[in-house]
Amino acid sequence: MPPFDYVVIGGGIVGLSTAWAILDKNPSIRLAVLEKESDWARHQTGRNSGVIHSGIYYKPGSLKAELCRVGNRRLQEFCDVHGIRYDVCGKVIVATKAGELPHLEKLLERGRANGLAVRRLSAPEVRELEPHVQCLEGLHVPSTGIINYADVCRTLAGLIQDLGGELCLGARARQIRILDNEAVVETEATTLTTRWVVNCAGLHSDRVAALGGVKPEARIVPFRGEYYELKPERRHLVRNLIYPVPDPEFPFLGVHFTRMIDGSVHAGPNAVLAFKREGYHRTAFDLRDFVDTMTYPGFWRLAARHARAGIEEMRRSFSKGAFVLSLQQLIPEVRAEDLVPSSAGVRAQALRRDGSLVDDFMIVSGPRTTHVCNAPSPAATASLEIGRFIAEQLPMVTLSSNHDKSKAPLLPTGT
């Protein structure tokens, strides 16, 4: 009989939230979390902008819209219970050109359709909230906040362990074999048998799905987001969060200002193709990752469709002056000498063969497996609800009722 009921692959916030939700639903089960790194939240979770999103951007009725809106509130409740610091500071989205005003109105309508308390602002009203912003009009989204998601992950890991889950760091899933009544997951150090596998591997989710014999309709294409940080003496230029009106034809939000929970202010990100799935520097390169992207028809169709915007993103990557010009559209007082480079992140974006981006969360089922194949922003905000959603979808496959956890072979653990 298999020693585990569920094995969750991936120690980011989605994987840990899912593991906790499964255990919270049925504490008697045996569950293990596999994470290839030496600590939790080392990639997308630990390298994002730390924003608790409101859900204003997402299509009404989509998983993103619903899980983000509910997840926003539930994340705050979770933090209140467990003493995790956060700040619901609100944000402004501002139109700096006349051509952006119709898009601002559509965002207002979408926000209200998603049940948000969004308010349209005149330029003077925007300056009451953000005195250094130059704009024509704006929106105020009061339910947006800031947090350190790595803190949430550490708390989740502790809760999983308290419920008897096994935490396995430094455990990369190398192979998955699907048998009649169980799945076998092999790592470099050990082999696990389980009733069900849940793949939350983020940047590698499509490859882990392939290990389990599932071919998703989309492939992960990595986009690096590069940031600058305002010097401490210039942080007064930004009170909270300042966003531009996003280009509806381009899949990213544009460079913006974000006050972090530690008081620093980050500016960015741009969005450029990464030549490595964990490529946090311009020179980072992995041959397999590079070939996977360059031989994928979906990438070239996307590149052709957004060639002009893509070139502008690359220009911002190599030219600090171009980056600063974009920021000055929001705050004219920002100067190049006010900014220092900060750490970058990589977004795992699922892309179809026709070049279209997967716009919603994508969760795919296979034999004895569930695969989270697209969970970009706002996945961190929605993570507790994503975990609950997955837990409710899973078959309740349990070991015999008299199974004794304490007698099962233990795996390497970490907290």
Image (tube, grey):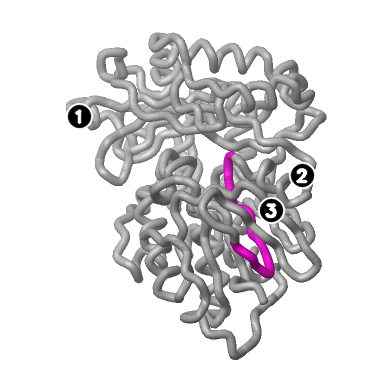
State how far apart marks 3 and 1 are (Cα). Answer: 49 Å
Q: Where on the picture, by quarter, is residue 297?
A: top right
Picture layout, residue 64 above or below residue 311: below
Q: Which mark is residue 232?
A: 1
Q: Amino acid at mark 2?
A: Pro
The reply to whether the magenta stretch includes residue 400 is no
Q: Amino acid at mark 1?
A: Pro
Q: Which residue is mark 3?
A: 176
**Residue at position x 66%, y 71% in the image:** 392
Magenta stretch: dominant secondary structure: strand
**Residue at position x 64%, y 64% in the image:** 390
- Left or right of residue 331, residue 270 in this image: right
Q: Position of residue 14 (x, y in %)?
A: 54, 55
Q: Secondary structure at mark 2?
A: loop
Q: Position of residue 168 (x, y in %)?
A: 46, 58
Extent of the magenta region: 192-203
Disc 3 or 1, which lies upstream in sequence? 3
Which is nearer the eye, 127 or 331? 331
* Farthest left residue in view: 233
Q: Which mark is residue 216?
A: 2
Q: Secondary structure at mark 1?
A: helix
Picture layout, residue 233 above or below residue 80: above
State how far apart marks 2 and 3 are (Cα). Answer: 16 Å
Viewer can see residue 252: yes
State how far apart marks 1 and 2 are (Cα). Answer: 45 Å
Q: Where on the picture, by quarter, is residue 262?
A: top left
Disc 2 or 3, which lies upstream in sequence? 3
Picture layout, residue 34 above or below residue 406: above
